[in-house]
Image (cartoon, rainbow, N blue to C red):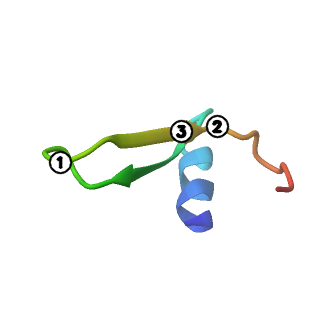
Amino acid sequence: MYRLEEELLEAGYKLIAGIDEAGRGPLAGPVFAAAAIIPPGTFI
């Protein structure tokens, strides 16, 4: 994934969101989703 992020930043994109979801799908039970935008070069 890091390579894709580098390509997007070189193409001029300023923000890239990482997303994830957890749940049983759209028809059964609750679904939770989250997104995070962390500045390039940030150590996590």
| 40 vs 31, nearest the viewer | 31
Disc on res. 37: 2
Query: What's the distance in space between the residues labelled 2 and 1, CA to CA?
Result: 29 Å
Q: In the image as oriented, which residue stretches furthest toward the top?
A: 14
Q: Which residue is mark 1?
A: 28
Mark earlier in primary sequence (2, 1): 1
Residue 2 vs residue 26, the one in the foreground: 26
- The structure residue drawn at horizontal position 51% and vertical position 39%, both measured from the top left corner, is 34
Image quarter of residue 1 = bottom right
Contact flag, marks 2 and 3 (Cβ < 8 Å): yes
Where is mark 3, residue-wise? 35
3 over 35 or under it: above or below: below
Q: Which quadrant of the figure contains the C terminus?
A: bottom right
Estimate the spatial distance between the alpha carbons at disc 2 and disc 3, rounded to whole Å.
7 Å
Three-letter amino acid code of the residue under disc 1 = Ala
Q: Position of residue 17 (x, y in %)?
A: 54, 41
- Residue 33 x, y percent position in the rendering: 43, 40
Disc nearest the viewer among 2 and 1: 1
- If you read the primary sequence from the N terminus, does the residue marked by circle 1 or circle 3 appear first? 1
